Every structure is written in C-alpha cells, then in structure tokens.
Image (cartoon, rainbow, N blue to C red):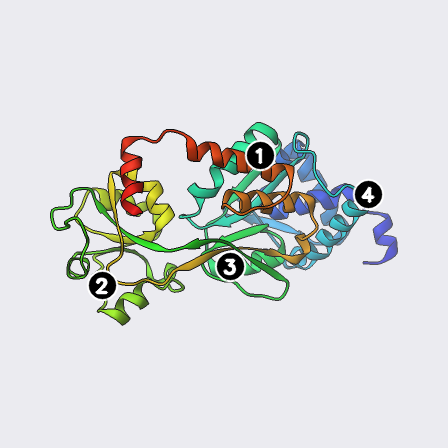
Amino acid sequence: MAIKNIRNIDLNLLVVFDTVYATGNISHAARQLSLTQPAVSNAISRLREHFNDQLFVRGGRGVKPTIRSQQMIEPVRDALRLIATQLDGRRDIDLPTYKRQFRMVIVDPLEPLLMPLLLQEIDERAPHISIETRPPSHTKVVDELMAGTLDLACYTFLLSAPGLVVVPLMPCDYVVISRRDHPRIGKVLDKNTFMALGHVALIPELRTQISIDRDITTRVNPRRVPYLVNKVWSIPAIIGSTELITVLPRRFAEYVAPIYDLAIHEAPVPISAQEYHMMWHEKNNEDPGHKWLRESLLVAAGQKVPGETSKWVASKRRNARTAPRTRAARTAIDSAK
C-alpha cells in the first residue's frame, strides 16, 4: 500500500474491517464493536471506495470476503496487533473492562469438561468477553487458524502447519458405556459380549484419527455398528434407551453417565490412549488476551499455570471436586475407577 494511501485511511476502519471479516455478519460486528449497523455499513462503504473493491459480498446469513479481502486480512491484523502492542505496554489484561470475542473449536468431549469453569469466570469477572465456538472440521481448522478467523482449537488429534503451536491439554483414555442394568452385561463386560452387541459410532470422517476401530479390528474383529452419528452428544441418549453400547473418552463418559443413567465399563479389548491438544498460531503467543484464554483452559484441564486468573479457575475446580455428588453421579464415577 502506498504511503499516500495510508495517510488517507482511518485506523478505525481497519478495526471494523477485521471484525466484519471475523464475524461474517454486519449486525454481529456492530454489536461486538458497540456501534450501530449503519455505522458499520458506512465504514465498509468507505473502505470499498478506498480500495476500489467490494471487500464483502452477501452470502448465506451474512457476508463473505472477496479475494481482495482475503489478501488484506493478514497484513491488516499484523498491523493492528503491532500497533496495540506498541501503544499498550501492559502485558496483562484488566478482566472487568477487557472487550473481546474469541472464536474457537472445541471437540464435544472436551466442552463440558473445560467450558463451564471458563464461562463462570467470564460471567463473574469478565463481562465483556464472549466466546463463539465453531463446528470442528479438521480440513478447515488449520486454514482458519492461519488466517486468524479462528483463535484456538482443542482437538483429539494433532494438526500441523508452519507457525502452528501445539501443546498437550489432557490425556484421553477410553471406556465402554451402556444403559444401566443392561440385560446382557454382567458385573464385568467380557470380550464376547462386547463384540456381539451393536455399537454406536461417529461417522467415518469424524473418527479417522481415532484409534478405536483400528485397535478393535486388529485385536479381534471389526465391531458391528448399526448406527453412526455426526456428533458425540447424540450418543448418550441413544445408549440410554437401547441395548447398544459405545466407546467414549473416560472423562466425558463420567460426565454423561449420571445424566442419562448409564453404566461405565472397562474396555475388554485394549484401546490405545490418546491426548487432547490445544493449537493456535504463533502470532498470538504474546497477545495478553489470547494468553489469558490459553492459561484458563490449561488450568481447567488440570494443569498448573501461574497467574491470578489461573488461581481463580483452580479454586473453582477444587470447589467442584469437593461439592456433594448425587447418588447416580457417585455410582457412575465409582464404577469407572
């Protein structure tokens, strides 16, 4: 961009451009920026005139970026990040006044384990922070992390790309769940019964990176799968009202068992443990808000991270562990030990 063009552009217009690009919606951008919709539309009109490009066109329920916008977004975000860093010498954030919307992907089994504590902190201490979750599609997540339209991803399997930071979040081992008092399962689920019963499983494209089918097929035979679903949250209700069984991550199974009156069994066929990972682009390493989000999720996952926010989340985790459990919850969790 020529120097003369830089002199004629209002920095606030670039902030609007970034927000519209991230949200894909004029109304959502206006709410996030505390502006009116006409004000955002006017800002985009000025940018269109300046760059001689539509920048955004109607698509679906919002707007989609043009090729020119896609070319601009990375330099614009780099510039805004650099300016913010230079003008604000602080390396932390003031939660009560901090305004930001984070966009992240989190796989279903992790969501009920991590998000309640984080959302409780936001509700109590950071009223101007919001989090928008996106559908987990590993074919798109890398591109969105690289483009900056996604801040963070929490996945079972590793994603890889230049500039992508990956850290372990928590281990993931597997158990079998069934309806309580299943007529064909005794005190211990044996291998023959495990293989004879029908299983509920994720559709193939969602389980390609999970070792369950590979381990069962290698050690015994392919399992019988009469029902395939496209989201993990569909599984517990199906298991609770049929004689089908399934294999789920242990901590997620412990969470849903008392809700749907399920029994937890150790897998009679060895299934390899895996690990959840947290991933983001290295450009966000020193971003104070992004760092707060990462540390809060790590502590919610049970890891020790220094900092005031982390101490708050850790105290909430301790309170949750010592809170009285319902009889159903105690039974489900005891059976998994």
- Name the front one of labels 1 and 2: 1
**Which mark is first along the chain, 2 or 3?**
3
**Image depth: mark 4 or mark 3 in front:** 4
Upstream in sequence: badge 2 or badge 4 = 4
Q: Name above or below for residue 195 compared with residue 48.
A: below
Rounded to the nearest whole Å, what is the CA distance between mark 1 and mark 4? 29 Å
Q: Position of residue 82 (x, y in %)?
A: 77, 51
215 sits to left or right of 98: left
Q: Is mark 3 on a helix, strand or loop?
A: helix
User: Mark 2: which amino acid?
Assistant: Arg
Q: Does 99 sit left or right of 226 as displayed?
A: right
Q: In which quarter of the image is residue 42?
A: top right
From the top left corner, tell me how far across and down residue 151 is, in percent. 59, 50
Mark sitting on residue 312: 1
Q: Position of residue 240 (x, y in %)?
A: 22, 42
What residue does disc 2 label? 223
Sequence-first disc among 3 and 1 = 3
State which tag comes first along the sequence, 1 or 4.
Answer: 4
Secondary structure of the residue carrying tag 4 is helix
Q: Name the residue under label 4.
A: 87
User: 294 or 160: nearer the eye?
Assistant: 294
- Residue 163 visible here: yes
Above or below residue 329? Residue 173 is below
Q: Which amino acid type corresponds to the residue marked 3 in the rendered image?
A: Lys
* Secondary structure category for the residue under label 1: helix
Q: Of the numbered discs in the image, which one, if any, rests on residue 140? A: 3
- Label 1 vs label 2: CA separation? 44 Å
Q: Distance between the residues labelled 3 and 2?
A: 30 Å
Which residue type carries mark 1? Trp
Instruction: Give whichever of 249, 228 is nearer the camera.
Output: 249
Q: Counting other residues with Cα less than 10 Å from the Cα at mark 1, is it few (<14), some (14-19), or many (20 or more)?
A: some
